[in-house]
Image (spheres, rainbow, N blue to C red):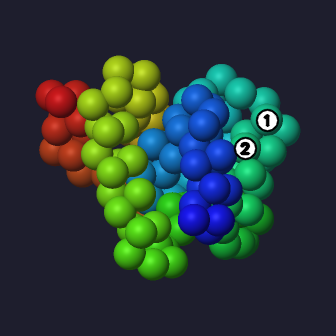
């Protein structure tokens, strides 16, 4: 029971849920990509990412000059179920979908690191699929 308390506390904030949603959609993002999509300062995004990392929901890795963030690998079956449920409910949330659309637009334009340097761009069909949801 105690292992889930930090997870649910971390998920009790709208901003952190929005960040988690962007990471589910993209796989991996740098702080500046999240800043641009959400309209937050670097400090605010970094603070939320640190909270999510401490709760075991987000992993980070260094790639050149960038720190990249992704959804953490599930620690156990319960953690996996929470992440699966969260991904499922965020797909139907209007704010989460709008954030994903803004991220898709940034991806098409070649956003900061994740898609212009580290990963290939998403295929147009994936972006079109997002719009049709």
Residue 54 position within the rendered picture, expressed as x and y whole percent measured from the top left: 73, 62
**Residue at position x 65%, y 65% from top?**
2
Q: Is residue 52 above or below residue 64?
A: above
Q: Is residue 56 visible?
A: no
Horizontal side, residue 42 vs residue 113: left or right:
right
Q: Is residue 4 above or below residue 124?
A: below
**Residue at position x 21%, y 46% from top?**
126
Q: In this view, does 88 lie above or below 4?
A: above
- The foreground one among 117 and 5 is 5
- The foreground one among 86 and 122 is 86
Q: Which residue lies furthest to the bottom in this view?
A: 76
Residue 131 position within the rendered picture, expressed as x and y whole percent measured from the top left: 22, 28
Kind of element beneath mark 2: helix
The residue that disc 2 covers is 48
Q: Is residue 94 above or below residue 92?
A: above
Alpha carbon separation for disc pair 1 and 2: 6 Å
Residue 115 position within the rendered picture, expressed as x and y whole percent measured from the top left: 47, 54
Kind of element beneath mark 1: helix
Within-10-Å neighbours for mark 1: few <14, some 14–19, many 20+: few
Horizontal side, residue 116 vs residue 129: left or right:
right
Q: Which residue lies furthest to the front in this view?
A: 1
Question: How many badges with numbers are in the image?
Answer: 2
Residue 130 position within the rendered picture, expressed as x and y whole percent measured from the top left: 24, 36
The residue that disc 1 covers is 44
- The foreground one among 24 and 34 is 24
**Residue at position x 67%, y 72% from top?**
61
Q: Can residue 62 be seen in this view?
A: yes
Q: Identify the image quadrant of the N terminus.
A: bottom right
Residues under numbered marks 1 and 2 in contact, where contact means CB atoms less than 8 Å apart: yes
Q: Residue furthest right?
A: 43
């Amino acid at each position: 029971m105690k292992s889930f308390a930090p997870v649910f506390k971390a998920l009790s904030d709208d901003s952190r849920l929005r960040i988690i949603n962007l990471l589910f959609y993209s796989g991996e993002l740098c702080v500046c990509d999240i800043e641009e999509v959400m309209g937050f300062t670097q400090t605010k995004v970094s603070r939320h990412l640190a909270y999510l990392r401490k709760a075991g929901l987000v992993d980070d890795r260094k790639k050149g000059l960038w720190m990249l963030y992704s959804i953490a690998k599930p620690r156990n079956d319960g953690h996996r179920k929470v992440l699966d449920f969260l991904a499922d409910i965020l797909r139907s949330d209007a704010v989460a979908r709008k954030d994903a659309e803004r991220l898709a637009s940034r991806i098409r334009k070649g956003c900061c690191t994740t898609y212009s340097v580290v990963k290939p761009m998403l295929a147009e069909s994936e972006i079109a699929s997002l719009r049709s949801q």
